[in-house]
Amino acid sequence: MTRRLLSAITLAVLGAASGFSSLAHAQSAARQEIRVSSNASDIATLDPHRATSTADKSVAQMLFNGLVRFPPGSADPAKLEADLAERWEASADKKQWTFFLRPNVKFHGDNGTVTADDVVYSIQRAADPKRSSFAGAFSMIEKVEAVDPLTVRFTLKYPDAAFLGRVSNYHGGNIVSKKAAEALGDKFGNAPVGTGPFKLAEHVTQQYVKLAANDQYFRGQPKIGAIVYRMIPSDSARDLAFASSEIDLMQGKREQRWVERARKRDMAVDIFEPSEFRVLHVNRNIKPLDNIKVRQALAMSINVDEIVRYVGADVAAKTCSVVPNGYLGVDCSAGEYRYDVAGAKKLLTEAGFPSGIEIKSIVSNISAQQPIMEIVQSQLAKAGIKLNLEVVDHATYQAQSRKDVSALVFYGAARYPDADNWLNEFFDSASAVDAPTAMSNFSHCAIADNAIRAARTEPDANKQLALWKDAQTSIHNDVCAVPLFGLKQVWVHAPRVKYGYDLQGALNLAPPITENTTVTAP
């Protein structure tokens, strides 16, 4: 049974999603639609608690809301504003948070209005590792309860500096319909029900996803009738479709040369935050990288400035720590690894490898990774480190990277912008890829566990910053990873597209399309 047919049956039987009437169809058809394409070959899920890829998140963000939200065009936690909650209060010790919901906010279809029970259900679901990919982000919640139909109270185990961000319109903070999610179970990702400005209309596997305007959206009727996300994984095919006005908004290549060519072709280029932080994780489970001198030699063999010059000044920013630039808690006092080929050779000799070493890395064939790893390969060779690259498709790279088969794991990600999220996922030993609570600690780093965990529960902001600093210094000295650069998001839009806001950032890594977005006919 195809996904399209499954979704159609599910919607018809359960009434859980779009609930289109002929009038709604006519209203949407009378408005212009916007056509979008990323580099995805398909959408895996539109369940906001399972959507982890950029392609999935960029579509799901149109369907859901959080208690609070990042304003459209912003990725700044200091600018969080009311969303499904009209207002909120925090206790003096910041361990109890109470949210007061907007009344009469309607879910898509015949699924009623948002109540405190939906919020409690959604957060408990987001915190459940069996139903969510973001469960770890909610570990500080002791209890969430409905005080009355429009009031929700959270009790935390300890103060959390990033708590508002956790209940925002990002990852697990999105609120789902309890009625629809319980009825659909594992099929919710095929027929998602939220409160956003658009609702799922159709998904044709490996061809397109269509969202239709939600004319009952609490912020007002969208100005466009539909969004069509076309699956065009080929960069050249996507460029051609944009040039021929078959698509209005597309993901570009995060390469300086591509950006410069696009500007010469009068494309409206959007370069925005957050950067996807590129890090080279050093896997100490693979010999001889268990030797600190070998790890130090490897770090000294990498010329980060050369890599950044290759990527380009518009799209790349050199980083100073294993925590990304701009994140709350980033600390650069440990300094950079010094590029010194002669020094690297000396360290290898001291470690017992005067003739050098040979290691292997599984590498994705995507344009954002393979060329960078080829540069790293060339740089390491100068110090006597032979890096064998096994180039595979991106899905295989993701799977193999979590099986300890790569001595070096090149990984890029963007997370909620505070140090705890990054340190917890990538450098706490509980997050090692072979641990029961595995996340993305590819290096099996454990040196900073105490500081990372103490910072997570530290109520004093200054002491928390000091602990994050200690963690970053320890990780640097132990060479758990070599920070490279932040790669900014690159999209282009046709001049006929008006976002309706100033695009400075987007945590879901794609320009959000809102009720105020407009597009005129080509």
Image (spheres, rainbow, N blue to C red):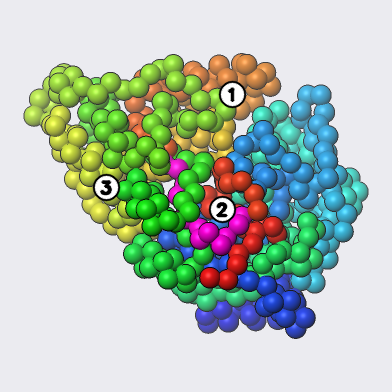
Query: SS of the residue at dot 1?
Result: helix
Label 1 with label 2: CB-CB less than 8 Å: no
Residue 328 visible in image: yes
Q: Which mark is residue 255?
A: none
Q: Nearer the viewer, mark 1 or mark 2?
A: 2
Say which element carries label 3: helix
Q: Residue furthest left?
A: 355
Alpha carbon distance from label 3 to label 2:
26 Å
Report x, y in % for residue 133: 56, 51
Mark nearer the N terminus (1 vs 2): 1
Q: What residue type is labelled 1?
A: Ala
Q: Where is residue 111 in the image (x, y as percent from the top left)?
A: 79, 68
SS type, badge 2: loop
Q: Which of marks 3 and 2 is nearer the N terminus?
A: 3
Residue type pointed to by label 2? Pro
State the residue in front, 370 or 274.
274
Residue under circle 3?
371
The magenta stretch is: 487-499
Estimate the spatial distance between the alpha carbons at disc 1 and disc 3, rounded to whole Å.
37 Å
| Horizontal relation, residue 219 to residue 489: left or right | right
Distance from label 1 to label 2 (Cα)? 33 Å
Membership of 498 in magenta stretch: yes
Q: Mark 2 points at which residue?
A: 511
The quarter of the displayed image where residue 460 is located: top right
Q: Mark 1 points at which residue?
A: 455
Q: Look at the picture and state if 510 lies above or below 8.
A: above
Within 10 angstroms of label 1, few (less than 14), some, or many (20 or more) residues? Answer: many
Residue 27: image quadrant is bottom right
Residue 70 x, y percent position in the rendering: 66, 44
